[in-house]
Image (cartoon, helix red, strand yellow):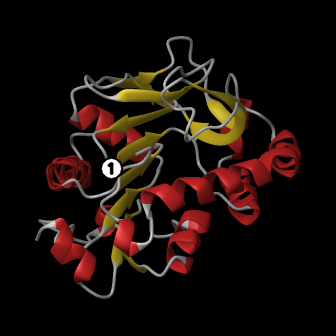
Amino acid sequence: MNQEARISRMPQKVLLVLHQATSDPGRVGEAIRTRGFELDMRIPAIGDPLPKTMDEHDAAVIFGGPMSANDDHEAFIRDETKLIDVILKSETPYLGICLGAQIMARALGARVAEHEDGFREIGYYQLTPTENGSPLFHQPMQAYQWHREGFDLPQGATLLASGDLFPNQAYQVGKNAFGIQFHPEVTEAMNRRWAKKAAHMLSDPGAQSAEVQLEGRRQYDEEVRNWLDRFLDHWLPPLAQQQAAFGS
């Protein structure tokens, strides 16, 4: 199905790939829904099949999870990696969040690994836009993170934002595919739940306490919310403009 056929088909549908039975697409899912798109949520880790083509979907998001993009022994990681190839070849708009960004990076031949000194990013950390990323990241931004691994920049990708501990924070592949290390989907309820469920990780090097995270949310959440709205307005534009690439 070509872009014209995809645009004319109703209803418009976005594939959301989650990784645990309790996973929540949070603010990203809600923002996509309010833009008029149907959400097709699948959890391959518990047996949900992934589509073989993107003919029935107008965009796709792969969210984060506690597993690694390097977990080749997991069939669902192998399947998600194969899906990236399908998405990129069809030029379907794609957003990879944390693990989803790492899976795309690895699918394109880049390394995914822990910080060499064992640091984690758990809490709010500054992102600095590159020159190429300035249309999307208007200024440095404090963004919510929860990860132990980062990714090298894939060959041919464009770096959009960088960080101190993990230098590659956001990148673009082709016209429609984006990978981000941070978590714009996380609501306050999700933040509290993650910090409680994984409290043992908050003593890891670089991690922020639950109290510091919630204080950061009070200070910085509005700018993260505004960033997400701007991003989605480009990535999921009105249907008549759906062929337009970001930044054109």
Residue 208 found in image quarter: top right
Q: Position of residue 68 (x, y in %)?
A: 38, 39
Residue 162 in the image, given as x and y percentages of width and height: 56, 24
> Seen in the image, is 202 located left or right of residue 91?
right
Q: Is residue 149 above or below residue 18?
A: above
In the image, taking residue 226 as reference, residue 85 lies left or right, namely left
Residue at 53% from the left image edge and 20% from the top image edge: 167
Residue 235: which quarter of the image?
Answer: bottom left
Q: Percent x, y for residue 141?
A: 71, 36
How many marks the image carries: the answer is: 1
Q: Is residue 17 above or below residue 14?
A: above
Depth check, front residue: 148 or 54:
54
Frontmost residue, 47 versus 233: 233
Specify whether 111 is left or right of 170: left
The residue carrying mark 1 is 176
Q: Residue at x 26, y 72 (%)?
A: 57
Amino acid at circle 1: Asn
Q: Residue furthest top?
A: 117
Name the foreground residue: 234 vs 40: 234
Query: In which quadrant of the rendered view does residue 191 lie?
Result: bottom right
Dot 1 falls on a residue whose secondary structure is: loop
| Residue 236 visible in this rendered orientation of the protein | yes
Label 1 Cα neighbours within 10 Å, binned few <14 / some 14-19 / many ≥20 = many
Q: Residue at x 21, y 27 (%)?
A: 109
Q: Which quadrant does the N terminus fall into?
A: bottom left
| Vertical relation: 129 (above or below) 44 | above
Image point 16% across, 76% down: which residue? 5
Instruction: Inspect this view and state whether residue 56 appears.
Output: no
Q: How far across and down, in percent of the image, does residue 142 sit?
A: 73, 36
